[in-house]
Each structure stands twice: as C-alpha cells, then as structure tokens.
Image (cartoon, rainbow, N blue to C red):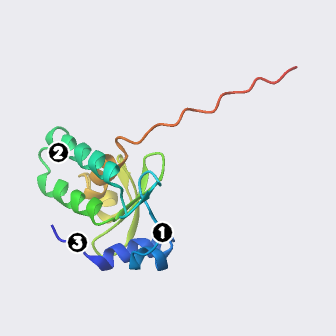
C-alpha cells in the first residue's frame, strides 16, 4: 500500500482543518470519523472498526471487486475520506478532485457514467457502517 502525503495535505486543505497544528504533528488532531482527539487522522478504535467492516464487506457484498476493495482500503488509510453527516462522506479521487459520496451513489466520473460501483462508494460504506445512530428528537406536544 502506498500513501501519498500530498493527498493527505490536499484533504486537509479541502476540509478546512487547522493545518498549522495538524501537518507538523505538534497540535491536537481530531478523528475524521468520531471527532475525538487522536494522534492521526483516525483514532485507533475507529480504524479497527472501519477495517473490520471493510473486511466483512469484502467477504460478502464486494467479494468480486477485490481490486476496488484494495483501493478503498488505501483511501481510508491515507485519510482521503471525511464524514459529513448521516452516511454522506467527502472523498478524494486519485487526481485530487473532491467528491460527495454515499454508499448508494457518488458524483465521480465512474459513479455518474457507469452502472458499476466505484471504490469511493465501497470506502463510504465501510466508513459509515458502524457509526453510532443518534436517536431522533422527541416530538414535543403543544398544549392546546
């Protein structure tokens, strides 16, 4: 697996993180998935959950797409995916373009023009599979 530090820096610039503290490694960094402080772009617990989810998806749903699962793992490990809300993520393509991605769709060229799945969707599926679901707000009854 190769990691491209310029890709990681490009992701940080696109998402407006505090570059001065994060790029030199002196300041606190937040996990891209849960928001807790960590020493990397993704904490140890979240990384384990995401990789376990990716292995499970590679065995079941994406068993015939081994090359795309490998690219999705590379995308996750190099920090090219950031959770926005729900199951929507922002991913970085190999050329540096930024895409909005959901497990059901992506606005990259392969996601728009092809009927096949792209590696961004596989990464978003694994990244958001084990996210905690927040309970819906209680509906408040108004007194009449």
In this rendering, the label closer to the viewer, 2 or 3: 3
Q: Secondary structure at mark 3?
A: loop
Mark 3 nearby-residue class (10 Å; few <14, some 14–19, many ≥20): few
Residue name at image x 43 percent, y 73 percent: 22
Residue labelled with disc 1: 15
Q: x%, y% of residue 82?
A: 41, 59
Residue labelled with disc 2: 58
Name the quarter where the N terminus is drawn. bottom left
Residue labelled with disc 3: 3
* Left or right: 61, with 36 as reference point: left
* Left or right: 137, with 96 as reference point: right
* Left or right: 22, with 3 as reference point: right
Mark nearer the N terminus (1 vs 2)? 1
Q: Secondary structure at mark 1?
A: helix
Q: x%, y% of residue 119?
A: 25, 57
Within the image, what quadrant is residue 42 found in? Answer: bottom left
Distance from the alpha carbon under mark 1 to that under mark 2:
28 Å
Distance from the alpha carbon under mark 3 to that under mark 1:
19 Å
Residue name at image x 34 percent, y 50 percent: 46
Mark 2 nearby-residue class (10 Å; few <14, some 14–19, many ≥20): some
Q: Nearer the viewer, residue 137 or 119?
A: 137
Q: x%, y% of residue 87?
A: 43, 46
Q: x%, y% of residue 58?
A: 17, 45
Mark 1 nearby-residue class (10 Å; few <14, some 14–19, many ≥20): few
Establish if 30 lies above or below 47: below
Name the quarter where the C terminus is drawn. top right
Mark nearer the N terminus (2 vs 3)? 3
Residue at the extreme right: 144
């Amino acid at each position: 697996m190769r990691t491209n530090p310029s890709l990681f820096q490009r992701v940080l610039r696109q998402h407006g993180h505090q570059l001065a503290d994060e790029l030199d490694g002196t300041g606190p960094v937040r996990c891209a998935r849960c928001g807790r402080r960590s020493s990397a772009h993704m904490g140890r617990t979240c990384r384990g959950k995401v990789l376990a989810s990716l292995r499970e998806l590679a065995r079941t749903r994406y068993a015939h797409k081994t090359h795309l699962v490998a690219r999705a793992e590379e995308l996750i490990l190099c920090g090219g995916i950031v959770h926005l809300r729900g199951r929507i993520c922002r991913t970085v393509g190999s050329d540096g373009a930024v895409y909005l991605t959901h497990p059901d769709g992506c606005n990259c060229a392969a996601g728009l023009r092809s009927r096949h799945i792209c590696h961004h969707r596989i990464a978003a599926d694994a990244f958001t599979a084990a996210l905690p679901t927040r309970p819906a707000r209680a509906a408040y009854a108004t007194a009449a």
